[in-house]
Amino acid sequence: MIRRLFLAAAILIAGTAISWIDDATPALAARPAPPGLSESTAAPPAPVDRRRFDLRRPAPDQPTASRGWLGVSVQDVTEDMRRSLNLTAEGGVLIADVIAEGPAAKGGLKAGDVILEFNRVRIRSATELLKVVTRTAPGSNALLQMSRDGKTFFVSTILGKADPAVAAAQPEIKPQPAVKAEPAEKLPPARPETYAVVIGIDYRGRGDIPNLKYASEDARKVFEVLTDPRYGGVPKENARLLINEKATRNEMLAALRKIRTWDGHAYVYFSGHGAPMTEDDKLVDAFLVPYDAAISDPEILAETSIRLSYLQELVDASQARGVMVALDACFSGGGKSIVAKGAKPLVGVMSATPLLAPKGAGKLILTSSAVNQQSWEDETELKGGIFSHYLLEGLKGKAADNVWVKGDDLARYVKSHVAGAVMRLKGVEQQPQATGLGDFAVARNWEKAKILDAGIAKEKLKAAFERGSISASQLSNGMDELSSGKRSKMLEAFLEGKIDEKKFGELY
């Protein structure tokens, strides 16, 4: 009796209900044999395999549950079992029962299967399996190497919660730090040969220029997306942000003139007022209006602003492989546009051909509206410039189904969305314009990149395992690296094709 009480206490451990059964207990003999075992091997003789570990009980709905639950009862594998199961791998534990709808059942495990590894850990006894399961946080992904009918395979499932009342019975197993079910994603590297100039001006503090509400905030958002490794990937040291008072004519010119010397990819964004320059009721040029522009008369405005024709000269002279300019401004004299005192608005006036027509491949200029239309902000729904809202969506990946968003993709996206949104929100026409060729990358479609990257990598690892180039533990280790987002240099070299799978198996 004392022996029974001692054993019962000793084997009541965290996250499980464990019963010991010896040869005097009829319950074991009455239990049907797992598939693949004869009746003579289903109940191992004493003193071998006297314990069956029951990991089947899920946690009640209590906030203290913090240890993993697999939903199986297991027992050690005897030599007789090993022969009956045609099991050649070392160690392993036999699944005696699987609870319906539990983590193991959802992973396709069956009674009679043998668990060989749990998250890279080789399992040699039921006690070892119990410890690694209960030390793993609920909600974590569990990768198991299994054996069935003499063949090994992998199963992935999500652990449930262990019963907290039973978990308290094993004080010697200290709780492990919680493992996040969704580890922080690994960010892609920056694109070192990319550059950006981002300008946003609300004109607050300028009583003589109509203030805008969202121009500076839109510029900040564009800057964040362009310098985010997931999207634009522009190194912050290669990017310039000019907001309100800092966006003087001199500062803007100094930043924009760098376009001529950049040799990678350059992105320019401006949100603020434009102004028209007309002759004989025709638009002949236009201006980007800096914060410190003077608008007392047309000549002074021309001297204190930046001509669009000069901006195009900078783009045409650029040696960069790709230049994209996006202007959320208009040049009609209304909306996000002004006219010098005494000048005539362009609204209702005949316009000439489009102002901007960059020369050569790899140069694209997007404007938020046609030359005789206004460009609008929205205060009710989008809370920003309407053109800028859809530009940002496109830069974050919505403009393309591929991994990279190209300039032409972005142009199509904003043109197809802005006109309808402006008509719905403002009841007027605003049609973005695109001139030039944008067959170059502007930003990543990060969500698509993650899916393709993870999917391709996992399939490559599985193929190497199936061909015998890597072991089960190497496969599990590689899968764990992919899940964590922290890849070793060896794994990256294999996935990038720098070493073949045989060499990878030797070195990993």
Image: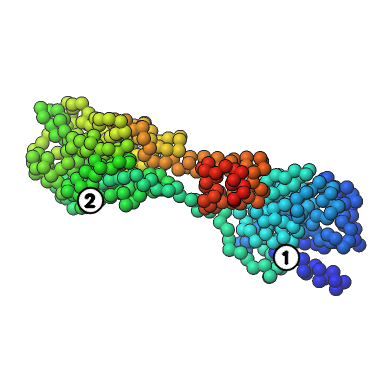
Q: Residues within 10 Å of mark 1 (few under 14, many from 20)?
A: many
Picture quadrant where residue 318 is located: top left
Residue 454 coordinates in the image, percent (x, y): 54, 43
Whether residues under marks 2 and 1 lie with C-beta atoms below 8 angstroms apart, the answer is no
Q: Is residue 358 left or right of residue 177?
A: left
Query: Does 124 sit left or right of 224 as displayed?
Result: right
| Circle 1 SS class | loop
Q: In the drawing, what numbered circle is on residue 244? A: 2
Q: Amino acid at mark 2?
A: Asn
Residue at image coords 15%, 43%: 305
Could you tell me which residue is drawn at 22 percent across and 38 percent down? 314
Q: Position of residue 262 (x, y in %)?
A: 28, 42
Decide: few, some or many residues near mark 2? Use Cα within 10 Å; few <14, some 14-19, many ≥20.
some
Residue 29: quadrant of the picture: bottom right
Task: From this view, report whether residue 419 is shown above or below residue 85.
Answer: above
- Which amino acid, mark 1? Ile
Which residue is rendered at x = 66% and y = 58% of the image? Answer: 68
Q: Residue at x 50, y 53 (%)?
A: 184
412 is higher (above) or lower (below) than 61: above
